[in-house]
Image (spheres, rainbow, N blue to C red):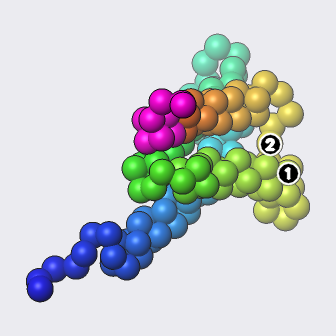
Amino acid sequence: MSGANPRGTGGTVANGLTLAVLVVDAVVLAVVELLFLPLRLDGYLLPYALGGIPVPVSALVAALTTPWLVSVAGRLSTRLLVAAAPLIGWILAVAVFGMFGPGNDLVLVADWRSLLLFACGALPSAIVLGKVLATTLGPAR
């Protein structure tokens, strides 16, 4: 017998490791998105333009990456907790790091950008999670 059984312990360990990497990626992305949330066109990091308007580019990053992580996790298992693990990790990281950031600072910006970040990360991911579960579980009986 050559090769490992894909449904044996080797496949389970690889899936568990992949899921752990996906959750860590979601947490790291949440922290980076929170740190770039206050980004403005004010001349410090970005050039000055249009009176220093906010540029919530981290919401766009959340809208693209978090649903992708959920879809990859959904391919690992049909269980809800496994498929939702990156989304749960992202939400917890945004909540905990946003409220109790480095040095116990409040990292969440107290305006519409925080709501936009949460909406762009959580809503598309929940839709992808529903789609993953609908395709893996089949039609309702």
Quick one: SS at disc 2? Answer: loop
Quarter of the view holding residue 49: top right
Asked whether 35 or 84 is in front, the reply is 84
Looking at the image, residue 18 sits to the left or right of residue 109; the answer is left
Q: Which mark is residue 49?
A: none
Quarter of the view holding residue 130: top right
Residue visible at 80% across and 56% down in the picture: 96
Amino acid type shown at disc 2: Leu
Quarter of the view holding residue 109: top right
Residue under label 2:
108
Which residue is situated farthest in the front direction here? 141
- Is residue 57 visible in the rendered image? The answer is no
Which residue is situated farthest in the left direction here? 2
Looking at the image, residue 101 sits to the left or right of residue 46; the answer is right
In this picture, is 15 found above or below 87?
Answer: below
Asked whether 4 or 48 is in front, the reply is 4
In this picture, is 80 found above or below 113?
Answer: below
In this picture, is 112 found above or below 130?
Answer: above
Amino acid type shown at disc 1: Met
Which residue is situated farthest in the bottom direction here? 1
Specify the segment rendered in magenta: 131-141
Residue 24 x, y percent position in the rendering: 55, 62
Residue under label 1:
99
In this picture, is 100 found above or below 40?
Answer: below
Residue 45 x, y percent position in the rendering: 60, 39
Q: How many C-alpha atoms fall within 10 Å of the one at disc 2: few (<14), some, or many (≥20)?
A: many
Asked whether 132 or 125 is in front, the reply is 132
Residue 137 x, y percent position in the rendering: 48, 41
Quick one: SS at disc 1? Answer: helix
Looking at the image, residue 4 sits to the left or right of residue 53; the answer is left
Asked whether disc 1 touches disc 2, contact meaning CB atoms under 8 Å apart, the reply is yes
